Image (spheres, grey):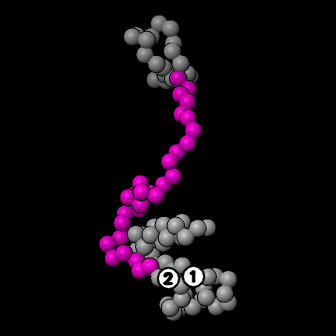
Amino acid sequence: MGCRSKVVAAEMATAAGIPAVIANGQIAGTISAAVRGQDVGTTFLARVDRVSSFKLWLKYAKPARGACQSRRRRRPGTAGGRDQPATGRRG
C-alpha cells in the first residue's frame, strides 16, 4: 500500500471522528504503543466536526461499474405503447 493510500485512509477515518496512526507495524510493540497513545509514526487527530456517513460515502465510494438491464418488454395493444412489466400487472 502506497503512502498516498495510507494518507487517504487516515483522512477518511479522521473525517468520521476516528483518530488514525500511520506507523511501522512490523516493529515489535509499535501497534500497542500507538493504541496507548505514545508518539509512534504519524498521528492524525479526529475531526471535531464529524462528517455525516452519507457525505463520507459520497466522497469516498468507488464508482459503480457495469450495466443496468431492464426486465420490461413492450406488450402489443397497450395504450400508447407504454412499457409493462414482463410478468404483467397484478391488480
Q: Residue 36 or 74: which is nearer the viewer?
A: 36
**Secondary structure state at the residue bearing disc 1:** loop
Judge whether 11 appears above or below 91 on screen. below
> In terms of sequence position, does the residue under pointer 2 or pointer 1 come before the other?
1
- Residue 77 shows up from this direction: yes
Q: Residue at the location (54% across, 66% down)?
A: 5
Q: Residue at the location (53% across, 23% down)?
A: 72
- Confirm or deny contact between disc 2 and disc 1 (CB under 8 A): yes
Give the magenta part as a residue range.
Answer: 44-72
Judge whether 11 appears above or below 41 on screen. above
How many discs appear? 2
Judge whether 73 appears above or below 7 on screen. above
Q: Residue at the location (48% across, 20% down)?
A: 84
Q: Position of residue 64 (x, y in %)?
A: 52, 45
**Residue 49 belongs to the span the image colors magenta:** yes
Q: Residue 17 or 74: which is nearer the viewer?
A: 17
Q: Which residue is mark 1?
A: 23
- Residue 9 shows up from this direction: no
Q: Which residue is mark 2?
A: 42
Q: Position of residue 46 (x, y in %)?
A: 40, 77
Question: Extreme front residue here?
Answer: 3
Amino acid residing under circle 1: Ala
What mark, if any, has residue 65 been given in the picture? none
Q: Quadrant of residue 55?
A: bottom left
Quarter of the image with the N terminus in it: bottom right
Q: Position of residue 40 (x, y in %)?
A: 54, 88
Q: Residues within 10 Å of mark 1 (few under 14, many from 20)?
A: some
Amino acid residing under circle 2: Thr
Q: Which SS does the magenta portion mostly show?
A: loop
**Secondary structure state at the residue bearing disc 2:** strand
Question: Extreme top residue here?
Answer: 77
Q: Residues within 10 Å of mark 2 (few under 14, many from 20)?
A: few
